Image: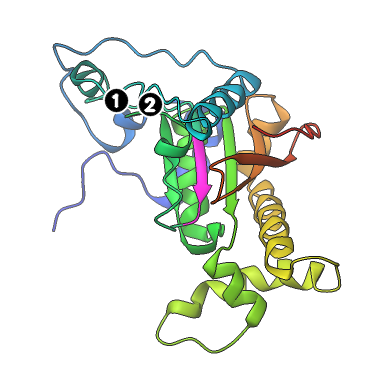
Amino acid sequence: MKLVKHSIQRRDFLRLGTVGLLVTANDIFWRAKPAQAAKPIVQSLDPDAALQKLIAGNLRFAEHHPEYPDQSPERLQEVAQAQHPFATILSCADSRVPAEIIFDQGIGDIFDVRIAGNIATPEAIGSIEYAVVLLGTPVLMVLGHERCGAVTAAVENQALPGEIGSFVKAILPAVDRVKEQPGDAVDNAVIANVQYQIATLRRSPLLSERLRSGKLKIVGGRYDLDTGKVFITTDSNSQYGHNS
């Protein structure tokens, strides 16, 4: 099977550097004719504004006043040939935590990376780097959630069949950090795991460069299954100490 003409080798990707990476994803991975009905999309939000847009959308969802933005046929055509999401979210694969719904966003708004336990595997990190560096998303959220099954499995640390337990190893360091902490062991571990995965992401040279330049904010969140609210738990740039 022939390789796509415009694909790049990993060593070439790393050698490009920050400046060379600031090109559109279309230029690198595929060529496509501009859609005649498409409108130009400009990513103008700074990290704080992007975070506030997520928080405002979650508030609408939690209060049962969603606006369902960016879900029209016009929006479908607008993003058909290029994507410019304003946020990247690393969240759990749990069916009860769909990012576009709980943040009341639409097509092309959020670059979703979903994996059990919202863990920063090499593949997840690569996907996030793609969204942050090539697509220019100004905010990255690691989103844990109440009563997470993956975190519960790590807390109980029991043998699981097949590859189901493969994510437990990635969560155990977070569990160890809070095992003596009072309160609910699973909920403590959910928040600790978000913080641990953020620390892992910050070791990415590509992401840390964006952080230093002020073009990226990394935050942690905990989604409450009962209320639909997302609480901001950690902020890479400052301690927000608020919730949505």
Look at the picture and state if 192 lies above or below 46: below
At horizontal 66% and vertical 39% (from top left) the residue drawn is: 219
Q: Are marks 2 and 1 in contact (CB under 8 Å)?
A: yes
Can residue 12 be seen here? The reply is no
Mark 1: few/some/many CA within 10 Å (<14, 14-19, 20+): some
Q: Position of residue 169 (x, y in %)?
A: 60, 75
Q: Quadrant of residue 156?
A: bottom right
Comparing 94 with 195, the one in front is 94
Mark 2: few/some/many CA within 10 Å (<14, 14-19, 20+): some
Here the colouring is rainbow
Q: Is residue 74 magenta?
A: no
Please tell me which of labels 2 and 1 falls first in the chain: 2
Q: Disc 1 marks which amino acid?
A: Ala
Comparing 112 with 134, the one in front is 112
At horizontal 80% and vertical 73% (from top left) the residue drawn is: 179
Of discs 2 and 1, which sits in the foreground?
1
Relative to residue 44, is residue 242 drawn left or right?
right
Look at the picture and state if 43 lies above or below 18: above
Q: Position of residue 204 (x, y in %)?
A: 63, 48
Q: Quadrant of residue 150?
A: bottom right
Q: Decide whether the magenta segment is chiefly helix, strand or loop.
A: strand
Q: How many marks?
A: 2
Q: Which residues are magenta?
A: 88-92
* Local secondary structure at mark 2: loop
Disc 2 to disc 1, C-alpha distance: 8 Å
| Mark identifier at residue 82 | 1
Relative to residue 101, is residue 215 drawn left or right?
right
Can residue 227 be seen here? The reply is yes
Q: Position of residue 161 (x, y in %)?
A: 43, 87
Residue at which label 2 appears: 24
Q: Is residue 91 magenta?
A: yes
Comparing 20 with 191, the one in front is 191
